[in-house]
Image: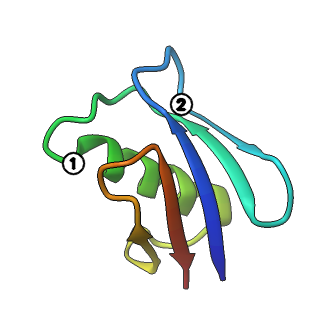
């Protein structure tokens, strides 16, 4: 399943907001340094969907706030 994610960085708290079936807004505490924010978003999505973090992969948007993920 592919989902589209809009990321907010350096937030006060980590949260996942579902906009519709395939669109999400995610706020993470991490800064965009050395991929730490991408790791935090991956972990947040894995927890939200109840999957292992290894089953959540970034397809595009590694350095963008708009990302596409695949949930396996």
Would you say 36 lies left or right of 19 here? left
Secondary element under disc 1, as helix, strand or loop, is: loop
Q: On the image, numbered disc 2 is attached to which residue?
A: 14
Would you say 13 lies left or right of 54 here? right
Query: The N terminus is located in which quarter?
Result: bottom right
Task: Identify which residue, 23 or 54, lies in the foreground.
Answer: 23
Q: Nearer the viewer, mark 1 or mark 2?
A: 1
- In the rendered image, residue 69, in percent from the top left (x then y), is placed at 52, 69
* Cα gap from disc 1 to disc 2, whole angstroms: 16 Å
Instruction: Sort mark 2 into few (<14), some (14-19) or many (20+) by Cα contacts within 10 Å.
Output: some
Question: In the rendered image of this protein, does residue 56 appear above or below residue 25?
Answer: below
Question: In the rendered image of this protein, does residue 19 appear above or below residue 12?
Answer: below
Q: Mark 1 or mark 2, which has the lower sequence index?
A: 2
- In the rendered image, residue 60, in percent from the top left (x then y), is placed at 41, 68
Query: Which residue does the image show at 52% across and 66% down from the upper left?
Result: 68
- In the rendered image, residue 32, in percent from the top left (x then y), is placed at 26, 35
Query: Which residue does the image show at 34% across and 50% down from the upper left?
Result: 38
Q: On the image, numbered disc 1 is attached to which residue?
A: 35
The quadrant in which residue 58 appears is bottom left
Q: Which mark is residue 27?
A: none
């Amino acid at each position: 399943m592919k989902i589209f994610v809009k990321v907010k960085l350096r937030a006060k708290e980590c949260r996942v907001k579902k906009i519709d079936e395939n669109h999400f807004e995610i706020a993470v505490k991490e800064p965009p340094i050395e991929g730490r924010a991408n790791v935090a978003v991956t972990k947040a999505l894995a927890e939200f969907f109840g999957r292992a973090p290894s089953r959540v992969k970034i397809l595009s948007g590694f350095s963008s706030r708009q990302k596409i993920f695949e949930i396996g």
